[in-house]
Amino acid sequence: MTTNTHNNTHSQSEYLFVYATLMRKANHPMHELIAEHSQYVGEATLSGHLYQIDYYPGVVAADSAESLVHGELYHISNSARLFAGLDDYEECSEAFPMPHEYARCQIAVTLTAQQRKVVAWVYTYEFSIEGKLRLMDGRFIRHD
């Protein structure tokens, strides 16, 4: 189940799930913002599908656990600053005209090591996936 509340910068959720260019091993400059305002918890998965949108990916959440997207879970220490930067990066802040390509939603994710479920903020892809390549293994870094 997803809840789209991208306009709410003060989250009830204390976690962020990232699945691609924002992961530590991607060495993207925006990861510095994540490292500054959150702490790495561990590897995690969410039920969904990962697509190659362009040179970047997009996640579409699904109810079935048969298709998993692999990523990292972070415990957020400063949600206001973190989401101000990430929402601008993902172009889903109020500064960008609607419709937005991405939305910040709350989704249940599973922490891999403990098999514990938590609700985390995730940036999901909102446009049509028609004609987009689905990354069947649910991992983006290998596809860069």
Image (tube, rainbow, N blue to C red):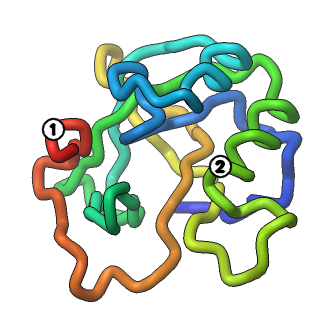
Residue at the extreme left: 136
**Left or right: 139 as drawn, with respect to 56:** left
Q: Position of residue 40 (x, y in %)?
A: 52, 13
Q: Label 1: which residue? A: 142
Alpha carbon separation for disc pair 2 and 1: 22 Å
Which SS class for mark 1?
helix
Residue 120's image quarter? Answer: top right
When the figure is inspected, residue 16 is found, relative to residue 5, above or below; the finding is above
Q: Label 2: which residue? A: 89
Amino acid type at image mark 2: Tyr
Which SS class for mark 2?
helix
- In front of the other: 78 or 91: 91
When the figure is inspected, residue 81 is found, relative to residue 61, above or below; the finding is above
Q: Position of residue 138 (x, y in %)?
A: 21, 48
**Left or right: 137 as drawn, with respect to 28:** left
Quadrant of the drawing holding the C terminus:
top left
**Left or right: 85 as drawn, with respect to 28:** right
Residue 21 appears in the rendering: yes
User: Residue, x 55% and y 48% (percent of image)?
Assistant: 122
Badge 2 or badge 1: first in the primary sequence: 2
Q: Residues within 10 Å of mark 2 (few under 14, many from 20)?
A: few
